[in-house]
Image (cartoon, coloured by chain):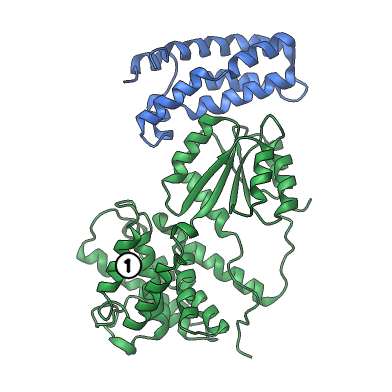
Amino acid sequence: MKNSGISKPTDYKTILNEVIAALARIIDVRDTYTSNHSIRVAEGSSMLASRLGYSKKETELVYRAGILHDIGKIGVPEEIINKQGNLSKEEFESIKIHTVLGYHILSGISWDPRIAEAAKYHHEKYNGTGYPNGLTGNNIPEIARIIALADAYDAMSSTRPYRTAMPLKYIKEEIEKNLGKQFDPVFGKAFIELLDEGKLPGTKKHQKKILIVDDEPINVEILKKMISADHSLDVFYCSTGNDAINLVKTGYFDLLLLDIYMPDMNGFEVYRQIKKINENIPAIFLTADKTKNTIDTANEFGVVEYLTKPYAQEIVLAVIHAMLSKKPHLNNDYEIIEE
Amino acid sequence: MLDNEAFKIAGIDYENGLERCLGDESLYTRLLGMFKDDNAFERLTTALDRGDITDAFECAHALKGVAVNLGMNTLFEADSELVNALRGDGDLNKARELYTSVKESYSKVMDALKYI
């Protein structure tokens, strides 16, 4: 079997998509507590764009701009980005710089200047109290007004080191209160519609479904505890390979955590059979075994990640998010470059 | 309340085990209770008596994963050596020898857990 089983792309569109996704991961990896923030903002922004009647191609542009909107954070010191607690005035000033830095990083992309504009203006507020330039109303580029909503929504709906995710009802009220103040009133109303419909990332429907397959209940309990602390993930488990195969048939799960040694069949065999049902479902193997032989076998099955015991929560969550974000995000039906 | 002194004697790293449970003491206690009821060690014993290397390997391996997750370091170390001896074709004589120290660590752990 080939490693990963996915053939290497040769067309420039796919390559560009992968490069953009890799750039997004650079940002998200640095910002420990907001893993996959860029991707969720891209998803929320493009949903809003589509709701506002944007064409497919324009929606795709919004997605890309959403993915890259925070790239300027690369120039902000890590200890400030990950600081728990209130920022001093100076620290806040240095965070603000990420908008301008992002603009200059992205302004080299000549095929659409709006990608750079989105990075620069996504913290502007409709009433002119935002940064970096204090633009008002329709002077703020449309794409930045869209991303501002998805960005604020994701900040509120994600769990941070100093607080858990806020309830949807509260988030909705916050957006409503700020129509015409922080947010574009028309775009804001459309965004609330999406929120009401449960279509936004971070809502229960959009939680990623993780299936643990392990016959050892103690280890399952520990993993459940670690994973369920992350509100973007919903965790399920079963204890036999056969159950896992039947559960995957439902098409409900986004990621498997597979124990290697189980009584009915080993994890590798389970995954081999599961791949026949759903070729693309990623898996992370669970093992107390760190021998090269086991790791090589995992690689042969196209498994690029495994977790060793004892589990550490940071590593468990980082690996899960990394595997989830490996799934292709960008739809190749779209043309990137204007003809 | 868990007995820290007894844990030390049994080679259980309380802080470490609790960390696996994200500081949730009631979860840790519950999982230690599950460990007490688990029969992997008994199955390991009978598998070795029978000379069933495959079964012994699976039991020792399961025990190893749970032990390390619960912070039972001494048991984990002893059991890891046993797992290695049972790997592949396995060396039954060596395994039986190593089993003695697994048994010893296991008894100490069970002793520390008797009030749970």
At horizontal 66% and vertical 32% (from top left) the residue drawn is A261
Q: Which residue in the rendered view is the most extreme toward the front? A: A197
> Where residue B85 sits: x, y (%)?
69, 19
Q: Label the green chain with its letter.
A: A
> Where residue A338 sits: x, y (%)?
60, 89
At horizontal 52% and vertical 32% (from top left) the residue drawn is A219
Looking at the image, residue A50 sits to the left or right of residue A8; the answer is left
Give the quadrant of residue A73: bottom left
Count of marks, rendered view: 1
At horizontal 40% and vertical 68% (from top left) the residue drawn is A195
Between A187 and A77, the one nearer to me in the picture:
A187
Quadrant position of the C terminus of chain A in the picture = bottom right
Q: Chain of mark 1?
A: A
Q: Which residue in the rendered view is the most extreme toward the left? A: A89
Looking at the image, residue A331 sits to the left or right of residue A230; the answer is right
Look at the image and tell me whether residue A77 can be seen. no
Q: Colour of chain B?
A: blue
* Residue B53 to residue A8: above or below: above
Amino acid type shown at disc 1: Lys
Disc 1 crowd rating (10 Å Cα; few below 14, some 14-19, many 20+) is some
Residue bearing mark 1: A172
* Residue A95 to residue A57: above or below: above
Looking at the image, residue A331 sits to the left or right of residue A66; the answer is right
> Where residue A40 sits: x, y (%)?
46, 65
> Where residue B61 sits: x, y (%)?
63, 25
At horizontal 48% and vertical 48% (from top left) the residue drawn is A317
